[in-house]
Image (spheres, helix red, strand yellow):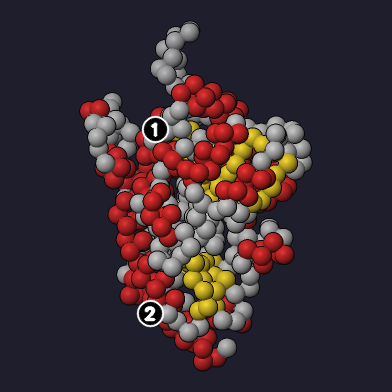
Amino acid sequence: MRGEKHNWSLETRAVQGAQGGDPVTGAISFPIYQSATFEHPALNETTGWDYSRQGNPTRSELEATIAALEGGLRGYAFSTGMAALSAVLDLLEKGDHAILSEDLYGGTWRLFDECARRRGIAFDFVDTRDVARVEQALCPTTRLVLAESPSNPMARVSDLAALAALCKQNGCLFAVDNTFLSPLFQRPLELGADMVIHSGSKFLAGHNDTLAGFVVVGSGGSEAQALADRLTLIHKTTGAVLSPFDSWLVLRGIKTLAVRIERQEESALRIALFLQGHPEVEEVYYAGLPDHPQYELSRRQASGFGSMISFRVRSKDQIAQVLERVQLIRFAESLGGVESLITFPWQQTHAAIPEDFRRRLGVDERLLRLSVGIEKAEDLIADLEEALVDCYQYC
């Protein structure tokens, strides 16, 4: 980073970026290099930039920034979170085996169920909260363990250090989807993970205005470098790279990441406590509640609980009423932006998962997922109160 001030806090690094602005022009806002190709000075000479699929200055600044925030060797910016996951899948070959958290985003389920299976890659969905179960699921061909923590949408928390140690003992890669917490609240690479994955569309970008995905490789010696080399090849060859403009949008979003997630977390706890005490809400799933089963684990391995809440209402007939009657909270997919969003996972984000499996996890017709934005907490609570009271009167 500029001035080699490696003792800067993560919050300051997020604001400054990898280079602290443009070293060439002094621009505080890193420029958008909206160019597909770059001129060579002469034969066998290069400015360091050739073609934007292979590398672009704006995207490289973003990749260096996310790598610095996660404490990794190298970051890779993709066009979507699913493109980032697909690149991780491309690390596997026919005959390999993977283990994934059973409670996870429905798109990840679909990627493995539809694409990995066709490639001859075997996989199992396991409750990664139970390290013993993960160990039982390991086999000689296991090459990857992928955990979401906290998970989507049931807010399950896995012991990342224990899983990392297990993977290291058995010679397989350990990847963590860190979308819900961001590197400012949780740093899986420091806990032993080999890779961190983000849907950058969410908290990192933070404004519900762009799509992005990231993979960050840990900094653990020659093995990490070999993994980075493989991902570099996949990244430039498959070509699902993030555009210069979208890279700039994410860079801009990351500058306010700290203040956003701190405000969102503060509001989320207040809202979770409100929902927990409401007569029309049967269950609340939020890692920041003291009675959450993995509350103490979260406190040990993360510096924050995030702002994703799932809750189950009394009757499935209440779902439509809540979704229709909230005024401030938007009924929309996605999460992590400044606007609060509410989603019905049963029909939206997790519809790709088989019905019996969804029900076993608790993703049923009475579950709603709330992404808390930066609006005033009192306003959000009033909005939910009105929607739920209306249900009480008319459902």
Label 1 element class: helix
Label 2 element class: helix
Which residue is pictured at 53% across the width and 43% down the height? 163
Q: Position of residue 47 (x, y in %)?
A: 40, 17
Task: Report the quarter where the N terminus lies.
Answer: top left
Q: Position of residue 145 (x, y in %)?
A: 60, 41
Query: Would you identify the image quadrant in which residue 95 lies?
Result: top right
- Answer with mark 2 or mark 1, whichever residue precedes in sequence: 1
Query: Would you identify the image quadrant in which residue 305 lies?
Result: bottom left
Q: Which residue is mark 1?
A: 64
Q: Which residue is mark 2?
A: 382
Q: Do we see residue 69 in this rendering?
A: yes
Q: Do we see residue 199 in this rendering?
A: no
Query: Three-letter amino acid code at disc 1?
Result: Ala
> In the displayed structure, would residue 70 be above or below residue 373?
above
Query: Three-letter amino acid code at disc 2?
Result: Ala
Which residue is pictured at 32% across the width and 61% down the height? 263
